[in-house]
Image (tube, rainbow, N blue to C red):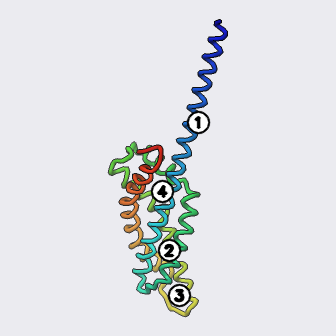
Amino acid sequence: MEKDTDMEDRNHTEEKDERAEEQARKAKEARKSVSRRMIIYMVITLSFFLSLVGTGTSGHFTVRSWIDSFIISTSVSMLMGFVIPVRYIVEKVCAKYDLQEGDLNTRLVESLIVDLLFTPLMTFLMILYAYVVATMNGAKLMPLITMYLSSLLSCFPVGFILIFLLMPLFRKFILSHTDIGE
């Protein structure tokens, strides 16, 4: 009789462990899904606006140049978003400085990290593309580094503000449409 009870207890424990493992797996998948959606939403939005700012401040805005910048920026940023462990980096930095999720200081640091990871490279690639196209068409331009730094001065703060404002809104929207909630 005791053997039967021990066996039932073990079976019950194994079932509980399996259920817990399954719940953990589902939660991990849900977090991955949220991360992927955040990357997609943020990349498209940042690329849209930073391409507008970059081409708009260049003094040579055309719809074609904006579309080209948007496509390049979106493509490269999407790749970066899926390769660079942004969430991991943000969490490590915030943990190091004992920042709590949701606090204003944490949001400022998160926004700065994301901006530092994406905006300089996105801006450089958009400027490089514009520079190459313009010089191939015979334009006489200022040095590439001057164009880059000038554009970065306008794109970096715009990127920071967009990230700061949109990341929590996108996160809240995405979490409201998943099983893991807030």
Label of residue 176 in the image: none
- Could you tell me the amino acid type at mark 1? Glu
Q: Residues within 10 Å of mark 1 (few under 14, many from 20)?
A: few
Residue at the spot of label 3: 134
Q: Is 121 in front, or is 43?
A: 43
* Spatial CA span between label 2 and label 4: 18 Å
Label of residue 70 in the image: 2
Label of residue 22 in the image: 1
Residue in the picture at 43% in, 84% down: 61
83 vs 14: above or below: below
Instruction: Give the mark, 4 or 1, whose residue is nearer the N terminus.
Output: 1
Circle 1 or circle 3, nearest the eye: 1
Q: In the rendered structure, are the residues bearing label 1 and label 3 in contact, judged by CB atoms less than 8 Å apart?
A: no
Instruction: Give the mark, 2 or 3, whose residue is nearer the N terminus.
Output: 2
Circle 3 or circle 4, nearest the eye: 4
Circle 4 or circle 1, nearest the eye: 1
Instruction: Give the mark, 2 or 4, whose residue is nearer the N terminus.
Output: 4
The residue furthest left is 104
Circle 1 or circle 2, nearest the eye: 1
Residue 136: horizontal and vertical position, in percent? 58, 89
Instruction: Give the mark, 1 or 3, whose residue is nearer the N terminus.
Output: 1
The residue furthest bottom is 138
* Spatial CA span between label 1 and label 2: 41 Å
- Could you tell me the amino acid type at mark 4? Met
Label of residue 38 in the image: 4
Question: Secondary structure beneath disc 2?
Answer: helix
Q: In the rendered structure, are the residues bearing label 3 and label 4 in contact, judged by CB atoms less than 8 Å apart?
A: no
